[in-house]
Structure formats: structure tokens, C-alpha cells
Amino acid sequence: MSQGFEIQIFNRYTNTMDIEKVYGDGMVKFAYGNPIGRLLGPMIASKMLSRLYGKSQDSLKSAKKVTPFLKNFNIPIDQYQKGSFKENPIETSYQSFNEFFIRAFKEGQRTFSQKYHEMGAFAEARYFGHENMHDELKIPVKGSMLRAVDLIGDHALAKDFIGGPLMIARLCPVDYHRYHYPDHGKTLKAFTVSGDLHSVNPLALKYREDIFIKNERRVSILETEHFGKLAYIEVGATCVGKIVQSFDESQPFKKGDEKGYFLFGGSTVVLCGEKGKWTPSQDMLKNTKAGIETYIQLGDAVAQQSKRI
């Protein structure tokens, strides 16, 4: 995964290994690697602190952070839609940092694979993928905490996903923060599992192996046309002001439809599948075995159907 605190990411599009520039890495190291920081852990991971910080990102004053943020992280802002102030240059068109944070792509910037046997990337993110979940799984650390029952929080619902494939899509603060449906289908059930709001950064995972099952998360059980049942799990994180569902879950969805978005803070989407129904992409599997995430753009192929369903 990393050398020391260096996070390596394989970029599918440039075929290169990139070093991630971590937003707020000093705070993450303090909170999880420093003895004093660990003592303050319960406060840092508290919902109250994250909600207050998230709310501050809605202020007009917070918009001043956008321009330096763009420069610091080399974000290709021309790919995105303007904010509320349409008459302004795009850099100053957002009325708050949160509005910038949940910016949408311009029409045509990203497209979902139309091949029925290819699952579209449900988030623009850094992916780990496994062909099946089991108690000795390492992702990126020892992983009994990644059993389906622990992730979903419901024994009856988790039965369908025991031994099935798994993908974890980690969104950085610099990323597009809307997430989408990977196939056509309908929502069978949706609920929230309460918990803390720890950082989901790999630096934090080095010290806290149970973050994915300790953090607050939103679980949706989906029935899809080509990939069977999916457990779609949105994981909250430190300073995530809110996880918002923008799609009417009482209605059927289409591949590529927006499902929701995260307000300020990097976060994660976990996808669990039924055994034998689909397999993560080969480059993702290869990189995961080496402990390296794969950067994949929204809509690109992240998995293939294993057999006709």
C-alpha cells in the first residue's frame, strides 16, 4: 500500500504508479499515529465535531478556499459545471466550499460502459477489489472486519453475500464526490448503521483496522439486471457533513444514474456481491494483491459478469 506514509496509486490511464498527495495528512498522522492524538480519538471521530466542521463548509466565507485548493491539487476544473454564480469564472462561481465539493461533471465528461457484462465504476475513486470475502482477507490490513455481516450489520441480509466479491472505492477530498448506480435495477431495502466518523485514509487504516465497520454507513440492498444482488455501502468519515441520497429509491434506477453524494470530507463506497456473479477487473485484482489501489474514472469498467444471471 505504501512505503512509510507514502500512498502509491496505479493510474489505469497513464499506466504509471502515482504518489498520492494527501489532504490533511498532518492531522491524520497526529490523530492516529500520535499518542496524544489517539487519546483525543473519540472527540476527533465524534459526529458532533464532523457535523460542525461540515456545516462550516456551507458558509460564504468558505468559498475563499476553492481557488488555492484548485492550485494545490491541480484539479482540472474545466471538466466541471459552474456553481451558483454563473456569471463568474468557474473558480469563483461556487458560493461555498461544499458547493464546490459536490460539483458535477459537464455533460459528456464521463460515460458508463454500455456493455451489459461490464459493471460501470460507481464512483471516481481509488479501488481495491477481491474475488471473494473471507476472514483472512487483507484490505489493506488484516480483515475479518470485512466480513459481509460486519459491513452490512444484519445477519439475514448478509447471507446472500458470504464468500462473494468485494470492491472498495476510496474517494479523496480532491475527487468528484457524487456516486452512481453500476447497473439497471431496483432498491430492495435501505437503512443506516450508526457509528463513528473516523478518517478512511490509508494512513488511518494503518492504526485502526476496524474503521469500515465502526464508522457510520448507509446500506442499500440492490437487485440488478446483470450482476445479481449488491450491497451498496456508503461509509461516512471524519468531517463528512452528510451523506445525501439524491435518487428516489422507491423508483427503479438505470446504469449511471446518480445515487447520492458526500458533503465535505473524503469517504468510501463498498460494494459486496453474490458469490459467482461477477469478478473485479483484472488490473484491480493484480494491484490489490500487491497492496496498491487502482485509480478508475466514473463509468469505466470495474467488474465483469461471471455468468449469465
Image (cartoon, rainbow, N blue to C red):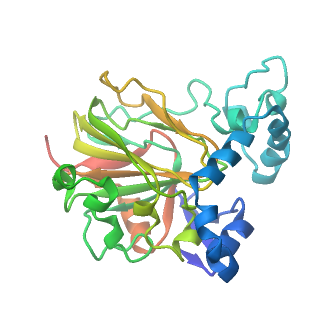
Kindly indicate the quadrant of the structure image that contains residue 91.
top right
Q: Is residue 295 above or below residue 82?
A: below
Q: Using the rendered image of the protein, determine whether residue 13 is visible from the camera's viewpoint.
A: no
Q: Using the rendered image of the protein, determine whether residue 39 is visible from the camera's viewpoint.
A: yes
Residue 257 image offset from top left, x and y in percent: 42, 28
Q: Residue at x 69, y 79 (%)?
A: 36
Q: Residue at x 15, y 47 (%)?
A: 307
Q: Residue at x 45, y 73 (%)?
A: 209
Q: Residue at x 68, y 26 (%)?
A: 81
Residue 252 image offset from top left, x and y in percent: 29, 23
Q: Is residue 15 above or below residue 248?
A: below
Q: Is residue 165 left or right of residue 80?
A: left
308 vs 14, nearest the viewer? 308
Q: Is residue 263 above or below residue 164?
A: above
62 vs 113, nearest the viewer? 62
98 vs 223, nearest the viewer? 98
Q: Is residue 257 above or below residue 133?
A: above
Residue 255 image offset from top left, x and y in percent: 36, 30
Q: Is residue 133 left or right of residue 239?
A: left
Q: Where is the C terminus found, in terms of image quarters?
A: top left
Residue 247 image offset from top left, x and y in percent: 43, 26
Q: So how many labels did they put on this image?
A: 0
90 vs 161, nearest the viewer? 161
